[in-house]
Image (cartoon, rainbow, N blue to C red):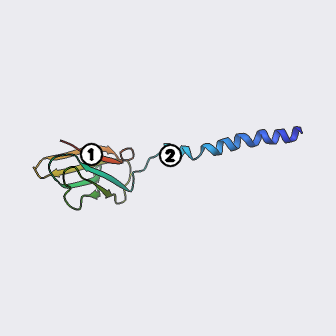
Amino acid sequence: MTLGHMSLRRILPAACALALLPVVPALAQSRPPAQIKITNARTVPLESLEITTTGEQARLVGKLAKPLAPGKSIMIKLNKPAGCSYYLLGKFSDESESDNDGIDLCKEKSLRLTE
């Protein structure tokens, strides 16, 4: 009986450790999503939007295919995103611009452009 009790004691901690494994990768999310939701919360259309990597050799990873009406949202596919920090430049029909440097797309799955 003692041998059986020792085996059970060894199995339980291993089972508990395995039960926790699926939680760890979800908490350590360090990759940007394949696509990101963009919402135009302004009162004028968003004419263009570009998402690029940051740094000396910036690379375009996503862009708006057509103007986005006020109050509307769209999913933009990211082309081979690398890292978490990105630069976003949006241009509106009233000639104003919205630019954000260093957006963490590993944390932000949607972006809302406002006044």
Q: Quadrant of residue 69?
A: bottom left
**Residue at 34% from the left image edge and 60% from the top image edge:** 79
Q: Residue furthest front?
A: 71
Task: Quadrant for the C terminus, please.
Answer: top left
Question: How dense is the environment of label 1, judged by Cα within 10 Å: few (below 14), some, or many (20 and up)?
Answer: few
Dot 2 lies on which element? helix
Q: Position of residue 70 (x, y in %)?
A: 19, 51
Q: Nearer the viewer, residue 62 or 53?
A: 62
Residue furthest to the right in view is 1
The mark nearer the N terminus, 2 or 1, is 2
88 up-or-down from 5: above or below: below
Q: Horizontal and vertical percent for residue 2?
A: 88, 37
Horizontal side of residue 99 vs 55, given as left or right:
left
Q: Secondary structure at mark 1?
A: strand
Whole-percent x and y of residue 54? 29, 49
Question: Cβ–Cβ below 8 Å for labels 2 and 1?
Answer: no
Residue bearing mark 1 = 112
Vertical order, 40 against 79 (above or below): above
Give the number of the disc on residue 100: none
The residue to which callout 2 is attached is: 26
Choose top left, top right, bottom left or bottom right for residue 104: top left
